[in-house]
Image (cartoon, rainbow, N blue to C red):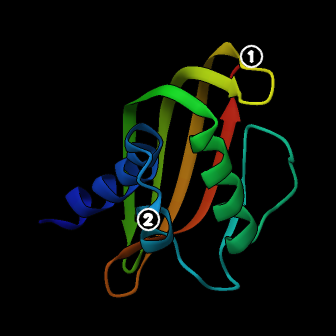
Amino acid sequence: MSDREEIITTVERFFEAGKTKDLTPLREIQLNDPAFSSFSDLPPYDLKDYNTSIELEELRYVSISDYDYSITNPKISIFGDVSIVAFELKQKGMLVDTKAYTGELMEIQGRATFVLVKKPSWKIAHIHLSKIS
């Protein structure tokens, strides 16, 4: 597999966890290191570390049923052992409130930037997700 193929597959695995509800890959594909950081399109909006990001991603994915996503117009730039992937992102699903037994349809049009480092496989070192109003 080429670097470009491995990079986009890694990014897709991040979102596939939401579809399959197999959250194990989230810990495998992200860099468990103090250098890791993330910004999200959902609160809290502060800069998060690895552990906080994993916890929030897991909570988010288990709270959304019928989750689906599409990545369009990806641009992959590789600078040695660092890669930047920017793309348009559409996410949708049903936000489920298990206490009230209610749901709310969710659809987010957004943009995303992922920074990956090769250690020795490509790992996500930074995530920035932002909604388009």
Q: Nearer the viewer, residue 104 or 87?
A: 104
Residue at the image position 80 percent from the left and 21 percent from the top: 100
Residue at 84% from the left image edge and 41% from the top image edge: 43
Note whether 94 is above or below 59 in the view shown.
Answer: above
Left or right of 67 on screen, residue 16: left
**8 lies above or below 72:** below
Which of 108/25 is in front?
Answer: 25
Q: Which residue is mark 1?
A: 133
Task: Indicate the position of residue 89 as horizontal and vertical percent values.
Answer: 50, 30
Q: Nearer the viewer, residue 87 or 100?
A: 100
Residue at the image position 75 percent from the left and 66 percent from the top: 52
- Residue 97 screen position, x and y as percent: 74, 27
Residue type highlighted by circle 1: Ser
Q: Name which residue type carries label 2.
A: Thr
User: Residue 132, image x and y in percent?
Assistant: 69, 22
Per the image, the residue denoted by label 2 is 24
Q: To which quarter of the image does residue 79 belong?
A: bottom left
